[in-house]
Image: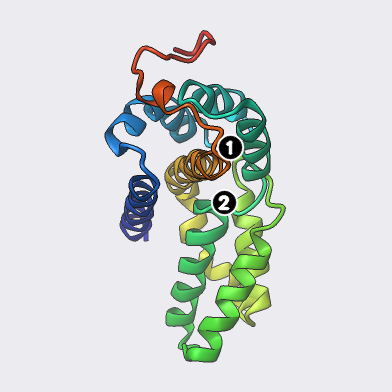
C-alpha cells in the first residue's frame, strides 16, 4: 500500500507538471523554487503549518499576493489531492478487494462522488485523512470494515508525508494557473532564480 500510494503521488505530481507546462511555466524552474516548501510539507505533514511559506513561495514565483493568499488558504482545507483524493480512493479499493465487495461501475461512480464531496472542508493538520477515510468507507457501505484499515493506519505518518507534499504542490500549481488566467502573474519574476522568499526559511 505504501509503494502504491507513493507511485500514485508521483503520477499526480507529473500531472501537475504537465498542467504547468501547458500554461507556459517551466517545470524545472518551478521545482527549483518550490522544493523548500515541498520539503517542509513532507517533514511537517501539515498543510496549514506550511501556509505562510506557501504564500511566500508563490510570491517569489511572481504570483499576485491576493491570488496566492486566497488560493493557498482555500487549498489548505479543501480539495487536497493526497489526503482527500488519492488516499481515501485507494483505501476504498483495498477494503473492497479484502472483503470481496463487488467493484462495478455504479460502485466506482459512488466512490468518486463520495471522495469528491468529502474533500470539502478537511482540516490541514496531520491525521485528518483517517477521519476522511472513515467517512468515505461508511458512505460507500464499507463502514463496518473500518477495523481492516488498522495496518494502514499504523504506518500513516509515512503515507501522510507524501500526501501533504502533494497537497501543497496542488496548491502551488492551482495558484499559478489561476493567476496566469487572470493575467496577473509576473513571468519575469517566475523565471528569475534570484527572486527568493523574503522570510528566514530560505
Crowding around mark 2 (Cα neighbors within 10 Å: few <14, some 14 to 19, many 20+) is many
Foreground: 198 or 83?
A: 198
150 sits to left or right of 114: left
Foreground: 145 or 11?
A: 11
Residue 88 x %, y %: 54, 64
**Quadrant placement of the C terminus:** top left
Residue 75 x %, y %: 62, 44
Label whose residue precedes the other's in the sequence (2 or 1): 1
Residue located 69% across and 57% down the image: 120
Callout 1 secondary element: loop
Q: Which mark is residue 47?
A: 1
Residue 149 x %, y %: 52, 65
Residue located 31% across and 29% down the image: 29
Residue located 45% across and 45% down the image: 166
Callout 2 secondary element: loop
Residue farthest along the front direction in this orientation: 183
Residue 112 falls in which quadrant of the image? Answer: bottom right
User: Badge 2 is on which residue?
Assistant: 80
Foreground: 78 or 128?
A: 78
Spatial distance from mark 2 to mark 1, Cα to Cα?
9 Å
Using the image, determine if residue 87 lies above or below residue 137: above
Q: Are marks 2 and 1 in contact (CB under 8 Å)?
A: yes
Residue located 60% across and 63% down the image: 133
Residue 13 x %, y %: 36, 49
Disc tally is: 2
Residue 106 falls in which quadrant of the image? Answer: bottom right
Amino acid at each position: 500500500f505504501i509503494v502504491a500510494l507513493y507511485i500514485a503521488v508521483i503520477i499526480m505530481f507529473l500531472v501537475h507538471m504537465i498542467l504547468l507546462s501547458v500554461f507556459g511555466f517551466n517545470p524545472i524552474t518551478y521545482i527549483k523554487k518550490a522544493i523548500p516548501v515541498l520539503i517542509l510539507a513532507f517533514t511537517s505533514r501539515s498543510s496549514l503549518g506550511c501556509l505562510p511559506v506557501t504564500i511566500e513561495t508563490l510570491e517569489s514565483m511572481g504570483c499576485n499576493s491576493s491570488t496566492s493568499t486566497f488560493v493557498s488558504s482555500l487549498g489548505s482545507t479543501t480539495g487536497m489531492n493526497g489526503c482527500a483524493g488519492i488516499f481515501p480512493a485507494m483505501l476504498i479499493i483495498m477494503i473492497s478487494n479484502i472483503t470481496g465487495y463487488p467493484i462495478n461501475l455504479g460502485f466506482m461512480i459512488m466512490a468518486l462522488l463520495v471522495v469528491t464531496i468529502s474533500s470539502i472542508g478537511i482540516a490541514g493538520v496531520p491525521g485528518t485523512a483517517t477521519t476522511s477515510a472513515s467517512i468515505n468507507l461508511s458512505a460507500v457501505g464499507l463502514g463496518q470494515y473500518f477495523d481492516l484499515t488498522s495496518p494502514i493506519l499504523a504506518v500513516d505518518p509515512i503515507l501522510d508525508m507524501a500526501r501533504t507534499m502533494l497537497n501543497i504542490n496542488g496548491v502551488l500549481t492551482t495558484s499559478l494557473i489561476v493567476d496566469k488566467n487572470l493575467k496577473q502573474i509576473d513571468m519575469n519574476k517566475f523565471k528569475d532564480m534570484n527572486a527568493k522568499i523574503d522570510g528566514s526559511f530560505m
